[in-house]
Image (cartoon, coloured by chain):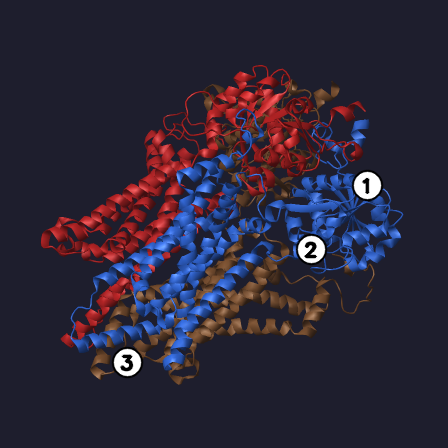
Chain colours: A brown, B red, C blue
Amino acid sequence: MHQDMTTPLLSPPAPSSDLLLPEGLQGPVVGILGTGDLCRSLCVRLVASGFRVVVGSRDPSRVRRGAFPDGVEVKSQTEAVDGAERLVFAAVFPEHYGSLVGLRDRLVGKVLVDVSNASGLNRKGPSNAEQLAKMFPQTPVVKGFNVLSAWALQNGPHDGNRQVLICSDCSDSKSLVVQLTRRLGFTPVDVGGLGSSGSVEEAPLLLFPSWGGPILTSFLLFLFFYGYSCTRRILLPYLDHGQNNLYQLPLVTVNETLPAVAMVTLALVYLPGVVASVLQLSRGTKYQPFPDWLDRWMCSRKQLGLLSFLCSVLHAVYSLCLSLRRAAGYTLTNAAFHQVKAGVENSWVEEQVWRSDLYLSSGTLGLGVLALLALTSLPSVGNALNWREFTFVQSGLGYVALTLSIVHVLFFGWDSAFKPSSYQFYLPPVFVLSLILPCCVLVSRLLLALPCLAFRLRKIRRGWESGRRTCPSGDDGGDV
Amino acid sequence: MHQDMTTPLLSPPAPSSDLLLPEGLQGPVVGILGTGDLCRSLCVRLVASGFRVVVGSRDPSRVRRGAFPDGVEVKSQTEAVDGAERLVFAAVFPEHYGSLVGLRDRLVGKVLVDVSNASGLNRKGPSNAEQLAKMFPQTPVVKGFNVLSAWALQNGPHDGNRQVLICSDCSDSKSLVVQLTRRLGFTPVDVGGLGSSGSVEEAPLLLFPSWGGPILTSFLLFLFFYGYSCTRRILLPYLDHGQNNLYQLPLVTVNETLPAVAMVTLALVYLPGVVASVLQLSRGTKYQPFPDWLDRWMCSRKQLGLLSFLCSVLHAVYSLCLSLRRAAGYTLTNAAFHQVKAGVENSWVEEQVWRSDLYLSSGTLGLGVLALLALTSLPSVGNALNWREFTFVQSGLGYVALTLSIVHVLFFGWDSAFKPSSYQFYLPPVFVLSLILPCCVLVSRLLLALPCLAFRLRKIRRGWESGRRTCPSGDDGGDV
Amino acid sequence: MHQDMTTPLLSPPAPSSDLLLPEGLQGPVVGILGTGDLCRSLCVRLVASGFRVVVGSRDPSRVRRGAFPDGVEVKSQTEAVDGAERLVFAAVFPEHYGSLVGLRDRLVGKVLVDVSNASGLNRKGPSNAEQLAKMFPQTPVVKGFNVLSAWALQNGPHDGNRQVLICSDCSDSKSLVVQLTRRLGFTPVDVGGLGSSGSVEEAPLLLFPSWGGPILTSFLLFLFFYGYSCTRRILLPYLDHGQNNLYQLPLVTVNETLPAVAMVTLALVYLPGVVASVLQLSRGTKYQPFPDWLDRWMCSRKQLGLLSFLCSVLHAVYSLCLSLRRAAGYTLTNAAFHQVKAGVENSWVEEQVWRSDLYLSSGTLGLGVLALLALTSLPSVGNALNWREFTFVQSGLGYVALTLSIVHVLFFGWDSAFKPSSYQFYLPPVFVLSLILPCCVLVSRLLLALPCLAFRLRKIRRGWESGRRTCPSGDDGGDV
C-alpha cells in the first residue's frame, strides 16, 4: 500500500503496478499559470501523457472550459499553485511576470518552469528566466519547452521539432523537467545552468543560423561574377564602340553567372576536407584541434553543397529557357536568311555538333549526380544510410559531380580559351575564372590519393601520431 | 520475492529490478485469437518488446510454427484465453466473430482488443467493436491497432505511421492498451469511448481525406479555364470563320490553363489568412472562433499550395517542351521563308527580346521559390525548422512567390492587355482573368501591413480585446 | 530503503521514486575501455541519458579531460573495470584486443560489449566478438552499437539510423544491453547468438545491399539497348554506305536508350506482382511460400521503380536539351534553305503537329505521375500514408504511369512501326522493342482484373484455400 501511494507521481503509466491496480491509476498534478494558446496546448499534451493538470487564471470565471481537454481543472492562480504537486509552469508573457509576485510564498517547495521566448535577439540584461529566479529566490526555476510551438506541443513529437533545450541552476529540479520532457515524448537536451537561458530563449527566434555564412558566400560570389560578366559583356562594349547589349542583363549574364557560382561553391565544399588532410599530414597527428575557421567551414559544407545544387538547377532551367527566348528565334531566322543569301545548302559544322552534345551530356549527368547528393541531405533519407553509404555518397559521388562539372565547362569552352578573340578587353571569359578553384581542389585531392600520402593519412586517422613511441598493443592510439 | 512476482506484468524491461534479477526476467503473457498475417506481425512486435505471447487457433495442429517467432505458444483458443494474463487480441475477420461466442465465460476478467477494419465507408449499424462489446457484455472491449498495417507492426514504429487511435468505454482497460502501445513504440491517441470506434475502423480506408476539397477546387478551376481557353481559341474562331485550331487541344490550351490554375490556387492559399485578419480586426478579439468554412479552408492551405506547385511545374515542363514541338519548327522555317521573301536582313525586335527574357526570368525565380516552399512541406524537413523559420518560409517566401508569379504574368502580358486585338470576341485573354484574385490578395495583404492596422492586429494576437478593460499586469490576455 | 538502494541501476529516471527522492538520483556506472572518438560519443550519449561513466585508458595522464562531458571519470583500465557496475564497453580496435588480456580476472561478473566493425567484407575465421569471447571465457560478450556512427551516437536517435543490431550467447547479458539501447533512445534488434556477430560487424560496411541487383539489371538493359541503338544507327550505316554518324554517340543514342530502359524497368516493377497472382491462382492458396527468386524480386520493386524514374528524368532532360543542340540549329536553317529554294510558303504538316503534341503531353503527364510515386518512396512521406493510400499510390498510380508511358511511346511511334522504312537492316526500332514487356504486363494485369479471376484471387488473399473444407465460422482462414 505504501508503494501504491508513492508510485504515481511523475509516471502515470508506472510500469510495475498499473496492471495490478488499474483502478488507482492517477497521474501527478501539474500546475500551469496562464490560459493562453501555449497553456492549452500544454494541457492537451500533459493530459494525453497521463498527467492531471490544474490551470491557474486571474479570473477563472471568464475562462471557456471548452478550450481545455477533459480532466483539466481551471481555478484561481493560488489554488493552482497549491494544487500542483511539484511542477508549476509559468505560461504568462514576461512583461506580466510582476503579477505573479503574490504567489511567492506558495511557490516555495515547487519548481517553476519558464516557457517564454526572448522578445528579440541580442538583448541586454537578464533573461526572462533569470528575472523569474530573482523574483522567487526560494523556488528553483527551470527554463524549457520554449523551443516548441503550441502546434508541436499539441500534436506531439511526431509532428514537430523533437529537441527541448532545458537549463537550470538546480540540478534536481532540472532532472524533474528532463523526465517530464521524456514522458511527453520529446528529447530533452541539458544545456547547463540558468546562465544559458538567454540563448535558450533566443533559439526559436533564430532564422536558419547555419545558413548565414554559406548564403553570404554564395551571394558575394554571385555579385562578383555578375559584375564581372556585366562589365565584360555590356559596359565595356558600350564604352568601346557604343554597342547596346543591355538586353543581356536579365537572362544571359545571369545564366553565365550561375554556373560559375555553382562551380566555385562546389569547390568550397571539398576544399576544407583537403585543407584538413594537409594539416593532419603536416602535424602528424589527428589529436591537435583544427583552427576555428576550419571547424566552422567544415560544418557549412552541407549548406554550401545545397546552394551549389540550387545554382546548378537554376542554371539548367535558364539554359533550357534559352530556346524559348524571342532572341533565339530571331537569331535562327537571321541565320537562315544569311544561309539563303550565301547559297550554302548545308551549314552543318561537325565539330560544333560534337561540342554541344558533349557539354550538354556531361552537364546533365553532373546535375543528376548533384541531385542524388542533395537527396541524401533530406533528413529522412540520410538517416537511412549507414556510415559507409553516407561516405560513398558525400565523398565519392561528390567528387564525381565536381569532375563532371569541370568536364562540362571544359567541353563548353572547347578551344576558345586558347583563342585571343575570347579575351576581349584583355578579360578572360567567366568560365575560365570559374575553373580555377575547382581544378585546384581536384588536383589536390588526387595528390592526397597518392599511396605514400594516403597511407600516412590513414595511419593518422586511426590514431597514430608521428614522433610518438608506437605501441601496437593497447596504446590509446588504437582506440575506436 | 513478492515484488518479483508482481512486477513484470506489462513492463518486461521493468527498470528497477531487471539488472538485479535478470534470470527471472519474464514479460507478461498476451493472448491473440487468430493466426493470420496481422497476428503474426503482432507476435513479432510483442516478442521484440519483451512480451510473451500465446496464440489461439481453432485447429492448432494445422498451424505452421515456423511462421511465429521463438517464444510464441500456439494453442487452442480456450487455452490461449486462459493463458493470457490480461489482454486478449481478437485478430479474426469481423464476419467470423460469431465463432468466439463460446469463449464468453473465460473472457470475464480479461480485456478484449478489437483490431479489425471497417468493411467499407459510411456503413450503417454498430461498428465491429460495438458488436463485440454486445457479444461479451462482461468483458471490456478496446478498439485499437487497426490503423497499423501488418508491415508497420512487424517492422516497428520507425517504418510506419506512428499514431495508434484507441477508444473504449472502460477507461482502465483503455489505459492498459495505451501503455502497451507505448511499450511497442507507437504513439497512442485516445479518441474517447466505443462510440468513436466506427470512425477508427474507417480510418485506414480513407483515401487522402485532407486532399479531397483542394483537389476538387483545382479541378474545377482547371475545367473553367480549360473550357474558357478552348472556347476562345478553338470554338469561336471555328464558328466565326471556320478556322480549324483543334491541334491546340492537347498542349497549347493546357499550357495556357495550367498557369492560371496555379496562380488562382496560390492566391487561395493566402486568401484565408487575409480573411482571418480582417475578421479579427473587425471583431476586435482573437477569442471568437472562426466560422467553420474558414477553419477548414485554413487547414487546406498546405494541400492547395502543393497543388499550385504541381501546376506550376507542369506548366514549366510544358513550356520547355514548346520548342520541341513540330509546330515550333514549322513556324520558324515559315518565318525564315517570309523574312527571305521580304528581304529583311535582321528581324530582331528589342522590345520582344526584353519581354521574353523578363517573363522567363521571373517565372524561373518564382518556380524556384515555390520549390523551396514545397520542400519544407516534406515532414522530415519541416520538422527541423523552428517556428520563426517556418513562418519565414511559409508566409515570407510564399508572398515572394506570389509576387514573382504576378510579375511573370505581367511581363508575359506586356502591353497586350491594352490592345483591342487581344479581346477577340470580346473575351479577355486567360492571363488577365488569372491575375484578378492574386492581385486582390496581394493588395489586401499590403493594406494589412499598414502600421495602423498591423499594430492593432498584433495587439489582438497577443490577447488584447477591444471593448474590454485593459489590465496590463497579469490579465489573462497577457498569457502566452 | 532497500528499494532505494537497488533501484537505480539501469534506469536513472526510475519513474516511481525520483520525484520523491530527487537528491539521491544517481545513474548506474558504465565502464568504457578506450578513449577514441567512439568512446567520447558514447560518453556524451550515456551521460545525456542519465548514466555515470568511467573511462579506462592505458595512460590516463595523457588524456585531455576536456574531450569528455562533465561527470565522466578517466582512470586506468583496471580501475574502470572495477568501477563499472555491470557493463564494460570495449572501444579498442580489434587488433589491440590482446592488450586487454590482463583484465581477465577483473572482468568476471561483468558484461563485455564489443562495438567494433569488421575490417573487411567476407573475412574468414572468427568475428571480433568471437575472438573476445574466446579471450574472456568467464565473461559474457555482447555484440552491439557498431552500426551507429560516432556522430549518430553523440547526437542521439533523431539524427541517425535508429536500429541497433545486438547479439550474444548469454540471453541475460543481451537483455541488459537491449534495455540500455532503449534508454539511449535507439531501437534494439535482437539478431540471435554470437554466431551472427560476423554479419553484424559487416553491416556498417555494406554499400546499398538492396540496390545491387536492380542497378545491375538496369545497367545490363542499358548496355543492351545502347549497343542495339549504336549498331542500328551508327555501325550498320557506316558498314553499308560509309555514312559517319558517330556524332550521335554522346546524346542521340543515349536519349534513345534511356526511355527504353525506363519502360522495361518499370514493367519489371509490376511483373512480379502479376507472377505472384498467377502462382496463387494456380496453386489455389496463399499459404505456399513463393520461390526465393520471386521473393527477392518483390523486395527489389521500390529500387527498380526509382531507377526507372531516374532514367525517365534523364530522358526528359536530354530531350529538353535537344533544341539547345547545335545540330538542331543547323537542321532548322537547312530546312529553311530548302523551303525557300522549293518556294513552299507554309511547311505545316498537321499530322506531325498532332503527333508531337500528343507524345510530349503524355510523356509529361507520365513523368509527373512517376514523380508522385517516387515522392512516396521518401521515408518521411511514405510513413504518413495509411495502407489504402499506399496501395492507391503504388499500385493505382503505378499502372497509370505505365499506361501513360506506353501511350507516350505509341504516339511517338505513330504509324512508323508499320512502315518498312523503319526496319533498316531488318532491325526494328528501339521503341518497338521497349514496348514488348510493358504491354505484356499491362495486358496480364487487365486479364487478372476480369471478374472471375479477380474474385477467386480476393478469396485466396483472405485465406481461402482450394481443395480444403470451407468453414465460414472461425476457421483459421478467416483470421486477419
Q: Position of residue B130 (x, y in %)?
A: 50, 20
Is A202 left or right of B85, judged from the image as shown? left
Which amino acid is tagged 3?
Asn
Q: Which residue is mark 3?
A: A346
User: As displayed, is residue C8 above or below residue B306?
Assistant: above
Quarter of the image with the N terminus of chain A in it:
top right
**Chain label for disc 2:** C
Is B63 left or right of A413, judged from the image as shown? right
Secondary structure of the residue carrying numbered label 1 = loop
- In the rendered image, is residue A111 in sight? yes
Mark 3 to mark 2 CA distance (whole Å): 62 Å
Q: Is residue A270 left or right of residue C2?
A: left
**x%, y% of residue A77?**
55, 23
Marks 1 and 2 sit apart, C-alpha to C-alpha, by 30 Å
The residue tagged 1 is C85
The residue wearing badge 2 is C202
Look at discs 3 and 1 and give the one toward the viewer: 3
**Which residue occupies the foreground of this view, A137 or A407?**
A407
Question: Could you say whether the residue bearing mark 3 is in a helix, strand or loop?
Answer: loop
Q: Residue furthest front?
A: C467
* Mark 1 closeness class: few <14, some 14–19, many ≥20 residues within 10 Å: some
> Disc 3 versus disc 1: distance between alpha carbons?
87 Å
Q: Nearer the viewer, residue A154 or C242?
A: C242
In the image, what residue type sits under mark 2?
Answer: Glu
Residue A120: tell me if it is visible. Answer: no
Q: Residue at x 20, y 70 (%)?
A: B335
Residue A222 sits above or below residue A112 on the image: below
Chain of the residue under the numbered disc 1 shown in the image: C
